[in-house]
Image (cartoon, rainbow, N blue to C red):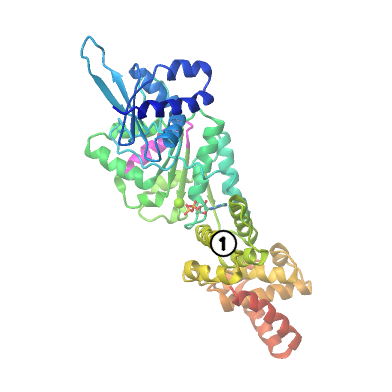
Amino acid sequence: MSKDHVEIWNSCLSVIKDNVTEQGYKTWFEPIVPLSLTDNVLTLQVPTQFFYEYLEVHYIDLLKTVIKRFVGAKGKLEYRIPVDSANSSGTITLPSSNRNYPKNPIGQPAPQRLSEGPINPFVIPGLKKLQIDSQLNENYTFENFIEGECNRLARSAGLKIAKEPGKTAFNPLVIYSSTGLGKTHLCHAIGLETKRLHPEKTVLYVQAEQLSTQYVTANKNNNRPDFINFYQMIDVLIIDDIQFLSGKAGTQDVFFHIFNHLQQNNKQIVITSDKFPSELQGMEDRLLSRFKWGLTADLQSPDLTTRTSIIREKLHDNGITFPEEVIQYIASNVRNNIRELEGVMNSLMAQSLLNKKSVTIDMAQQIIDRFVRNTVKEVSVEYIINIVCEFFKITPEQMALNTRKQQVVQARQIAMYLSKKYSNASLVSIGQQCGKKDHATVHHACKTIADRLETDKQFKVMFADIEKKIALS
Ligand code: ADP
Ligand code: MG
């Protein structure tokens, strides 16, 4: 047998030694005997079943790290436990959670791995507390979830929940928005922060789709009660993309029971949806009415400031700089979807690293054309308002004020005119967004501006300046 496994295990031990207490090292690592290394699987002999369980619960992260480092990216771990010699002289082999996703004892398929966190998706015998893989993605934290007007309510509700899960009025917290605006990110951030503040709580992030698949399997295997029991043991249950349950009566029914149980026991529920709850088709009313018990908060398209912050944060994270004009260009042109904004940034950052030269507006334009332009054709009223306000050096709030100040009135009328020309919004909606005016006011504004464009040369020049900015987008 090759000696590799011994050498490799010794290398592992040298790192482990630096990362655990002396007592821990003596108790849990010295008794381990490396047995073999075949096909990237390092097999370790441990004295007892309890030993194995203890390692998997307390040291799995460290073990994963050293295995990755010394066996390689494909490295796996397997344990052998000598079977009581009175019965047999053999060994039993147990996979490490590092190796395969262990079968969930309640008969559901193992959830898809999303995070690099500890993996214990099964109830560990002898331990009181349920140990599960929370399925949280550690890259999605509150720290890197940029705060803006567009997400302030949902974000602060999320923080509050993480502080006091199940104890606030925000139960359930329903987060809704169209795609790419941060629902999933916020869910993970809530889960991670809850675990950080309350390590004893059992937190589970699950996509509604997974929930549904698990339920179908559990049903097939006559395991419905186990399925329900499992979910009823969770302290903070986060269900992403609930719209997936539309039309799935069975899963909705079972979720209704789980929901009630959790809520009665002051457990926290977080739900996301790509529609406002009452607009979810194919969802039972009794379930929808439950959602209203808590807080429904939306994530809106990010405003210019938030988009700029997201871009800066991304650059900062990657230690890259872009010329200011490029940052402004991207922020002005990728407006409705943060996922797209990230796609554009990743592409541009890769190009800048590859070519070792500075990113230009031309490059940004090409990438945006390729990734975004065809999906975002329409200019929003909000965007137009921002451009106009920027031009007149007033805030959108000031523009909305009910004042007769000439400059404000003029800005508002121009915003209305341009909104009619460039957005698909109705006159009613334009009026609402431009200071809660009615459609007749918008109509009048459009006529006023059209008249002035005919007669006032100076005005025409100024107007062209503003229009250019919008047409550029
Ligand atoms: P959704 O679930 O609503 O479709 P995601 O949560 O997947 O959206 O977000 C899409 C991408 O945008 C993710 O990579 C996420 O990290 C990023 N993102 C969304 N909102 C923010 C924010 N406020 N700050 C930083 N990144 C964000
Ligand atoms: Mg999502």
Q: Residue furthest left?
A: 88
Q: Residue at x 62, y 67 (%)?
A: 329
Q: Where is mark 1, residue-wise?
A: 352
Q: Is mark 1 within 8 Å of ligand 1?
A: no
Quarter occupied by residue 37: top left
Q: Residue furthest right?
A: 405
Asked whether residue 359 is in view, the answer is yes
Query: Residue 438 placed where, x, y %?
Result: 62, 71
Q: Is residue 460 above or below residue 379?
A: below
Q: Is residue 175 above or below residue 23?
A: below
- Local crowd size for mark 1, using a 10 Å CA cut-off: few (<14), some (14–19), many (≥20): some
Query: Residue 423 placed where, x, y %?
Result: 55, 74
Q: Main secondary structure of the magenta part?
A: helix
Question: Which segment is the magenta one?
Answer: 251-268
Q: Amino acid at mark 1?
A: Ser
Picture quarter with the C terminus: bottom right
Query: Residue 267 placed where, x, y %?
Result: 47, 33
* Residue 25 painted magenta: no
Picture quarter with the N terminus: top left
Comparing 246 with 203, the one in front is: 203
Quarter occupied by residue 402: bottom right
Q: Is residue 363 above or below residue 74?
A: below
Comparing 347 with 185, the one in front is: 347
Query: Residue 153 placed where, x, y %?
Result: 59, 48
Asked whether residue 294 is in view, the answer is no
Q: Is residue 466 above or below residue 34?
A: below
Quarter occupied by residue 455: bottom right
Secondary structure under tag 1 reads helix
Q: Residue at x 64, y 78 (%)?
A: 468
Q: Residue furthest front?
A: 2
